């Protein structure tokens, strides 16, 4: 098994070396320039395009493991891209037309699996990339699932609960013929939560086979509330998985979670749970940034107090005014408001991006003062940003490994629903940890075998699993 090495100059609190970014192209960008597959399947060779970036990483890893050409072209495009438009009545009586997507990338290993995002900036290319990442993530975790992703272009923050429910129900109705408990199983993502999953499952149950039991129909989504078949531990699962991966990989970099400094971008489900679990293990949260702004406290921000502040007011802004601490000492855990630039410059051992894709571009990558980036979000950096981070010696724990805890506990939920059982919180945590540690081990083994970075290694390990499935299944007819 390989040993991760602390990269040049990345001493505690000093960040990585200030070596200038490589003028050369990254391995992924070289693949984009030379691979014929982009022309064969009709993809742009634009390195800044998120989908092109995802395919390039796959092709780079495919070359290392010798994946057959036919599997590469199958993976280079999703199997199905579904786009729907549907009208919804708003609270003021007017109707608005919404656009929704469901992309089913690959199902060689099992039913399509992946979240539903409600966000004003959802586009087909993003959904395709996220569906692709789900194929890789499920394969790396050795789950019996393929990859899918969906979303609705809307702004859930500006909608009432009733409007959100009607959008959810109409979207479910629009795609109900194309999903199913053993065919395509959505879950929560940015802008959706357990309540949205409950409305979705209820709608699916009402619209489809009336002879099937409700419990079976409800398997169509995971991430449900526990009252309707959700699993204990699902809400915190992605954050727990980030922490489990860090606990497995950080010691080899000489970083101890107890006492380490960390920062988080995005304080929603993934960011806030990661922060709370790290906090309880003795790590110090020193900076947070979300869509409402950034805050910093080198003495440590109370992750629990910040979570309850965000759940009340919708963002981290205002916490600096002295929001109190979970220990009850009001004002003792405040923070200073900071700019985005100050956030990225804050010295930390670990930075956890847990917001949207592509936030770490060249400019941010050049000023980040972290030894490790543990990717809670999917594809948080651009190829150019990645190249700068690589040249500066920042270690990256890639998203398909680091944030796989959510889909893993989704799988547990699906298994529990299928077998009409419910697991204890302890069993969920133990099984999750076992699977995260095993996947981290596969990634380290691939890194050692193929002498590559952690992201490429995670793809290599995932593609080996997908490649073996195609080798034994063959390609129809
Ligand atoms: P969420 O909606 O609960 O939280 C999103 C966070 O991003 C919010 O705190 C928001 O303030 C922040 N944000 C939005 N725009 C921002 C901006 N411009 N600058 C800074 N912060 C901004 O979403 P989530 O479920 O926590 O998902 C976060 C990321 O994790 C996404 O990339 C998602 O795909 C990924 N992910 C989520 C899960 C899951 O189980 N929820 C699983 C795997 C991966």
Image: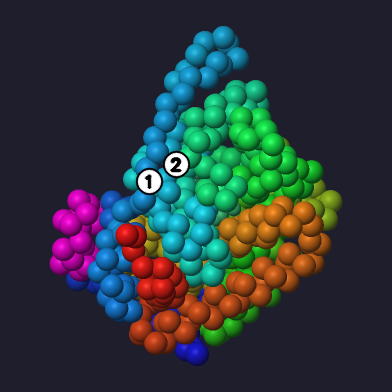
Residue under numbered circle 1: 80
Taking the spot 43% from the left edge, 82% from the top edge, the residue there is: 446
- The residue at 61%/30% (across/down) is 207
Q: Choose between 339 and 172: the one closer to the eye.
A: 172
Residue at disc 2, secondary structure: strand
Q: Which residue is most to the front? A: 477
Residue 47 on the magenta span: yes
Report the residue marked by disc 2: 102
Q: What is the spatial separation of the Cα atoms under label 2 and label 1, in whole angstroms? A: 8 Å
Kindly give the residue lying farthest to the right in the view shown: 328
The answer, for residue 34, to whether it is visible in the render is yes
Q: Relative to 24, is 99 above or below?
A: above
Q: Position of residue 255 (x, y in %)?
A: 58, 80
Q: Residues within 10 Å of mark 1 (few under 14, many from 20)?
A: some
**Residue 458 position (above or below residue 186):** below
Q: Is residue 236 visible?
A: no
| Residue 311 within the magenta-colored segment of the rendering | no
């Amino acid at each position: 098994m390989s040993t991760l090495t602390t990269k040049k100059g990345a001493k505690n609190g000093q960040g990585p070396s200030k070596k200038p970014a490589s003028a050369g192209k990254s391995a992924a960008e070289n693949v984009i320039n030379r691979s014929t597959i982009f022309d064969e399947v009709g993809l742009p060779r634009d390195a800044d395009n998120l989908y092109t970036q995802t395919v390039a990483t796959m092709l780079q890893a495919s070359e290392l493991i010798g994946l057959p050409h036919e599997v590469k072209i199958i993976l280079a495009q999703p199997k199905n891209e579904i786009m729907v438009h549907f009208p919804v009545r708003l609270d003021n009586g007017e109707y608005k037309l919404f656009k929704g997507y469901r992309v089913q990338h690959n199902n060689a290993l099992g039913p399509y699996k992946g979240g539903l995002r409600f966000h004003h900036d959802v586009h087909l290319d993003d959904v395709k990339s996220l569906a692709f990442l789900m194929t890789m993530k499920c394969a790396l975790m050795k789950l019996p699932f393929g990859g899918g992703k969906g979303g609705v272009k809307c702004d859930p923050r500006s909608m009432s609960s009733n409007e959100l429910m009607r959008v959810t129900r109409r979207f479910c109705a629009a795609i109900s013929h194309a999903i199913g408990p053993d065919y395509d199983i959505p879950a929560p993502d940015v802008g959706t939560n357990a309540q949205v999953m409950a409305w979705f499952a209820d709608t699916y149950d009402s619209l489809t086979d009336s002879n099937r039991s409700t419990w079976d129909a409800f398997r169509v989504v995971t991430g449900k509330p526990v009252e309707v078949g959700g699993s204990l531990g699902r809400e915190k699962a992605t954050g727990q998985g980030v922490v489990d991966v860090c606990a497995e990989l950080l010691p080899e970099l000489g970083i101890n979670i107890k006492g380490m400094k960390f920062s988080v971008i995005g304080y929603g489900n993934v960011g806030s749970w990661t922060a709370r679990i790290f906090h309880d293990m003795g790590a110090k949260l020193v900076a947070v940034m979300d869509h409402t702004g950034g805050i910093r406290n080198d003495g440590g921000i109370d992750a629990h107090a910040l979570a309850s502040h965000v759940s009340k007011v919708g963002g981290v802004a205002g916490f600096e005014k002295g929001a109190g601490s979970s220990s009850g000492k009001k004002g003792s855990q405040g923070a200073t408001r900071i700019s985005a630039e100050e956030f990225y410059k804050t010295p930390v051992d670990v930075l956890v991006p847990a917001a949207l894709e592509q936030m770490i571009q060249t400019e941010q990558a050049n000023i980040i003062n972290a030894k490790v980036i543990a990717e809670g979000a999917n594809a948080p950096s651009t190829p150019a940003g990645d190249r700068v981070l690589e040249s500066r010696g920042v270690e990256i724990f890639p998203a398909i490994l680091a944030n796989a805890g959510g889909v893993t506990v989704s799988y547990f939920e699906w298994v529990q629903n299928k077998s009409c059982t419910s697991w204890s919180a302890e069993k969920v945590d133990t099984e999750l940890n076992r699977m995260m540690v095993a996947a981290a081990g596969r990634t380290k083994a691939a890194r050692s075998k193929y002498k590559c970075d952690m992201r490429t290694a995670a793809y290599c390990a995932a593609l080996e699993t997908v490649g073996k499935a195609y080798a034994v299944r063959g390609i129809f007819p």
